[in-house]
Amino acid sequence: MGRGTTLLEAALLGRVPSGCDANPLCQKLIAPRLNPPTILKVQERLAEINFDAVAKMPKGLLAFYHPQTLQQICALRSYLLGREKSRLLDSVDAWIQMVALNRLTGHSPGFFSVYTMPPNQAVSIESQLRINKRLGQKPEFRSVPDLILAKTKSLLGTLSDAERKALRGSGAKAEILVRSCEYLPEISDDSINLVVTSPPFLNVVDYASDNWLRNWFVGLDENAAQFVIHKKLEDWEASIGRVLLGLHRILRPGGWIAFEVGEIQRGKIQLEDSVISAGIAAGLEPELVLINSQQFTKTANCWGVRNNDLGTNTNRVILFKKRF
Ligand SMILES: C[S@@+](CC[C@H](N)C(=O)[O-])C[C@H]1O[C@@H](n2cnc3c(N)ncnc32)[C@H](O)[C@@H]1O
């Protein structure tokens, strides 16, 4: 599921999406986008929230934020956690939480923080202090409610009536599962037309520590999620085999799986080889592999990765079909 783009696009097409991710943050990122409030409702709610309220402020976060911005973030955090605890968190609060989660850190004045990495790859406080020193930067004040409203306007301003209608229909029926995708008992046999998925590429990304700031904001324990992190290719392949077996069960005959992986370890390992053999063992028929050679990306740039050198430089999508 990740940030949920596949679910959102499916709902906009009038399909009923089912999504699964081990990370509970994913639910907070996609559920509000499947049920978006109006801009006016968000504006009214932001005006009701007391951004000056006294809240616990972790001082270390001043590496990222101006003191007044941190005050506003902490006030919003405490408001949202309070609403959640008393079961009052509605779709407008959830939308505000989702936008805030995506604005926590970034590289431009559109984010709450001073120049840094995006919130799904948040650096540690120590690293941020080093970045600030190197760039000679000091966090400037950013208004949390103003930035949330501006982003809400840019996200919802172009949503057409037809798109809202599609979301009210299919989006409302969406099934969002926060669990390991190795077993999906909630989803019935032969019920899914198309699976689109992209697993962790071996142990390349540490999803728990990369999301430490987002987890703090929503009060999540970063060790709560059951990620598939395998160091050895054979363990990864066995786990992908279990996933593909489960996907074979839920797919209707004639249904498709688009399974995206990449090449790792400087192209020495092409993960599609493992996925294809695991898929065949699960009873699926590989039809083709789509290879997209990526161009230079901004994120790779931040990591000091030059294209076609380190990192993952291609998307490799294996298309499987379930015949019967
Ligand atoms: C390569 S990312 C996919 C990113 C997604 N395509 C996106 O654009 O946001 C892999 C995803 O797998 C999730 N994940 C890791 N282990 C999992 C497991 N056992 N079951 C379900 N999801 C898992 C991670 O939380 C992460 O969101």
Image (cartoon, rainbow, N blue to C red):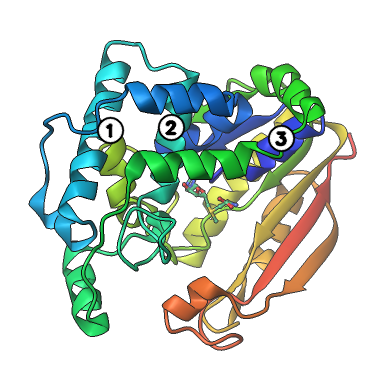
Q: Mark 2 or 3 closer to N-term?
A: 2
Disc 1 on helix, strand or loop? helix
Residue at the spot 70% in from the left edge and 53% down from the top edge:
259
Q: Is residue 168 above or below residue 233?
A: above
**What's the CA distance linking mark 1 and mark 2?**
9 Å
**Residues at badges 1 and 3 in contact (C-beta under 8 Å)?**
no
Q: Badge 2: how crowded within 10 Å, few (<14), some, or many (20+)? A: many
65 left or right of 202? left
Pointer 3 residue? 159
Q: Amino acid at mark 3?
A: Leu
Q: Amino acid at mark 1?
A: Leu
Residue at the spot 31% in from the left edge and 58% down from the top edge:
113
Disc 3 on helix, strand or loop? loop
5 left or right of 68? right
Q: Quadrant of residue 137?
A: bottom left
- The spot of residue 55 in percent (x, y) is 13, 33
Q: Is residue 303 above or below residue 317?
A: below
Q: Which mark is residue 236?
A: none
**Residues at badges 1 and 2 in contact (C-beta under 8 Å)?**
yes
- Which residue is more in the foreground, 80 or 247? 80
284 left or right of 79? right
Disc 2 on helix, strand or loop? helix
Q: Is residue 75 above or below residue 233?
A: above
Pointer 2 residue? 96
- The spot of residue 129 in percent (x, y) is 17, 71
